[in-house]
Image: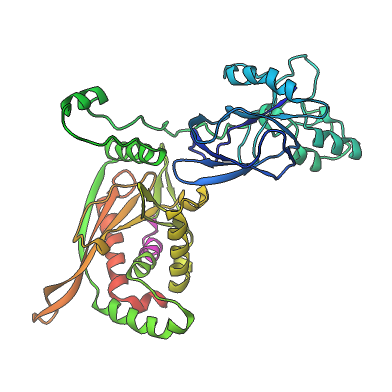
Amino acid sequence: MPVEILMPALSPTMEEGTLAKWLVKEGDTVSAGDLLAEIETDKATMEFEAVDEGVIGKLLVAEGTEGVKVNSPIALLLEDGESASDAKAAAPKAEAAPKAEAPKAEAVTVAATPAPAAPKAADGGRVFASPLARRIAADKGIDLAGLTGSGPHGRIVKADVEGASPQAKPAAAATAMPAASAPAAGKAPAPAMASGPSTDTVLKMYEGRAYTEIKLDGMRKTIAARLTEAKQTIPHFYLRRDIQLDALMAFRGQLNAQLEGRGVKLSVNDFIIKACALALQQVPAANAVWAGDRVLQLKPSDVAVAVAIDGGLFTPVLKDAEAKSLSALSAEMKDLAARAKSKKLAPHEYQGGSFAISNLGMFGIDNFDAVINPPHGAILAVGAGVKKPVVGKDGALAVATVMSVTLSVDHRVIDGALGAELLQAIKDNLENPMAMLA
């Protein structure tokens, strides 16, 4: 029976994707580890590989197809002795197979996709295993009936056999593994699209007016859903401070002059990332995220930074930012931003973190309020540094470079006084930049 290749879940929240490009064609022979296709999620375009060997019998989904559900069949793989006619016969069954029933064809997918526990074979006795797994088992003298498969629908694959011993005994019971596309326990399902007037209502409202209709891609749909969720479910409150940057600008100039020979040029944003990372260590109770029925207080400072791209934005995460030098943070941020703009970030590079930074100062924005990206506890909105009159400690009037910032805080995670303490720590770090290197 031909083996189904399933649409992989390339991130914990992925429910569907676009099959951007096939890297194989019908009739090609593939082995474990070979690249099969490029899959476009709401955040990135990623390659995925086979965990089995065989011949591509039929491609069930055409290139460019959008909205392909996770774990739905996208191709058929022929086993030893099977031909293209077997694939044609199995294709309608694969495409029409209801989700509630165990599919008649065996299934194979990429290593990145966790799979459900092994179901019983339709004939009551067959052990589902890939040809490669069977050969390895035979060479090592392993009884396949004693193994629990980690492949889709409990199929035994190469990795299961390589880690087993010849003395393996039949498993008493298979332990079910959660499907990759299922939401984590306690986590609310992804919200629907942003509420408002219906499409028909809006189209009628602008009937007779010239306009261009822009189709929503996966990223824009996700942004609309997540930000609607954030504003509807997170009790935001806002704290504002002005930060004087003159000492930082002078210190930055000195460092850049010394680092010029190494090709390093620090930005103000690099200092802001470092200041926030250290502040989360100085006020550890604020280094926290909302987890449905509890709060998780993180030990490292994993700081997300918003990066604008064509049609949306990414928030790549700089992990352990408190422990990295300014030059290391600068280099990592430049790399993440460049790959974000080409949608080449892996999910682990833009998921997680407890705190985010959104800097619109380079666009001339004086101040603004940012929307919290759940499950983060807070986000810092950074405005432009502008020359303003200030009153010094001696009461004299002077001119200083002042940057306005707003800390948006999730009141479920951080109370007002704690948020104020965090923002004060950020301000102190930026106004005394040399101390950040101590």
Question: Relative to residue 379, is residue 85 drawn left or right?
Answer: right
**Residue 230 seen from this side:** yes
Query: Within the image, what quadrant is residue 31 found in?
Result: top right
Q: Is residue 182 left or right of residue 161?
A: left
Q: Measured from the top left, where is residue 438 in percent x and y?
A: 42, 78
Give the total of numbered labels: 0
- The reply, left or right, for residue 67 in relation to residue 370 is right
Is residue 301 in view? no
What residue lies at 65% left-to-right and 19% top-to-bottom? 103
Kindly report the secondary structure that dominates the magenta region of the rendered protein: helix
Relative to residue 245, is residue 410 depicted above or below? above
176 falls in the magenta region: no
- Is 87 in front, or is 413? 87
The range drawn in magenta is: 276-285
Percent of width and height locating residue 268: 32, 70
* Placement of 412 over or under 250, stated as above or below: above
- In the figure, residue 122 lies in which quadrant? top right
Towards the viewer: 282 or 157: 157
The quadrant of the picture occupied by the N terminus is: top right
User: Residue 180: x percent and y percent?
Assistant: 56, 35
Q: Position of residue 105 (x, y in %)?
A: 70, 21
